[in-house]
Amino acid sequence: MAKQIIKKTTEQLYEYDAELRKTYPVLCGVDEAGRGPLAGDVYAAAVILNPEIKIDGINDSKKLSEKKREIIFDKICDSAISYCIAKASVEEIEKYNILGATMLAMQRAVTGLSQEISLTLIDGNRLPELEMSLRAIVQGDATSASIAAASILAKVSRDRALKEIDKEYPQYGFAKHKGYGTKAHYAAISEYGISPVHRPSFLKKLSLKNEND
């Protein structure tokens, strides 16, 4: 059966959160960015939105253009009650696997907030180990304004990091594909080998020699 795609307006996302705040006054949204790419750290963000300030255009980061995400990113940072952007390194991805590293990044993001939380909403179907009230929401970034905001913070932060990595390793084209397994990216790996920012466990099938060897 095909996965049903949730499509909601920004207003509906805020309404979802408003209903929850009747029981949980301080609501936190958490999402990640970068689980699928072949290179780079995995990022997570946690955000407590100010319920008195509605940011026009907040939605699942995948539904927004890069330019729109950048604009909303700044608005979230300026108006949020608290937010934290964290990451888990390539080394941690290799040590704990991508799921474990993602949960670690989420833990770091939530514990980096400056406010106590009534309920933390996590995008997806897995929960990080945190001693607080948690709720997993599948397609949460298309359901909750708080999770959508977190998805934007995580996505923009990771994209910015990949643009910086591109300056050090321009031959791979990170600024364009952001580390995902595009045809051009695979071609670059075939030509130049695996760089220190690549995830070896994601490239086992290529059997390529690391550039540092």
Image: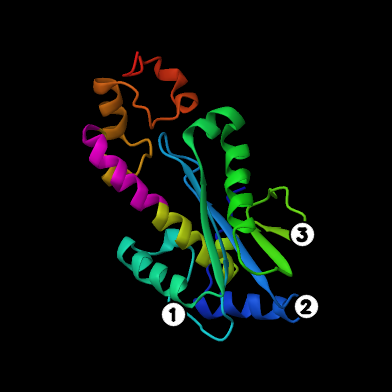
Counting from the top left corner in percent of width and height, residue 16 is at 64, 75
Which numbered disc, 2 or 3, marks the residue that appears first in the sequence?
Answer: 2
Q: Which residue is mark 3?
A: 132
Q: Residue furthest bottom?
A: 52
One can see residue 6 in this view: no
Q: Residue at x 54, y 65 (%)?
A: 83
Counting from the top left corner in percent of width and height, residue 204 is at 46, 19
**Identity of the amino acid at label 3?**
Met
- Magenta region, residue range: 158-171
Q: Residue at x 68, y 74 (%)?
A: 26
Cα distance between the residues tagged 2 and 3 = 15 Å
- Between 141 and 21, the residue placed more toward the observer is 21
Which numbered disc, 2 or 1, marks the residue that appears first in the sequence?
Answer: 2
Q: Say above or below: 148 vs 190.
A: below
SS class, disc 1: loop
Cα distance between the residues tagged 1 and 3 = 30 Å
Q: For the stretch drawn in magenta, what is the main secondary structure?
A: helix
Numbered disc in front, either 1 or 3: 3
Structural crowding at the residue carrying mark 2, measured as other residues with C-alpha within 10 Å and reported as few (<14), some (14–19) or many (≥20):
few
One can see residue 182 in this view: yes
Colour scheme employed for the rendering of this structure: rainbow
SS class, disc 2: loop
**Identity of the amino acid at label 1?**
Asp
The question of residue 180 being in magenta is answered with no
Which numbered disc, 1 or 3, marks the residue that appears first in the sequence?
Answer: 1
Query: Is 94 situated left or right of 78 in this image?
Result: right
**Identity of the amino acid at label 2?**
Thr
Q: Say above or below: 126 vs 49.
A: above
Residue 23 numbered tag: 2
Q: Say above or below: 54 vs 2.
A: below
Structural crowding at the residue carrying mark 3, measured as other residues with C-alpha within 10 Å and reported as few (<14), some (14–19) or many (≥20):
few
Location of residue 17 by image quarter: bottom right
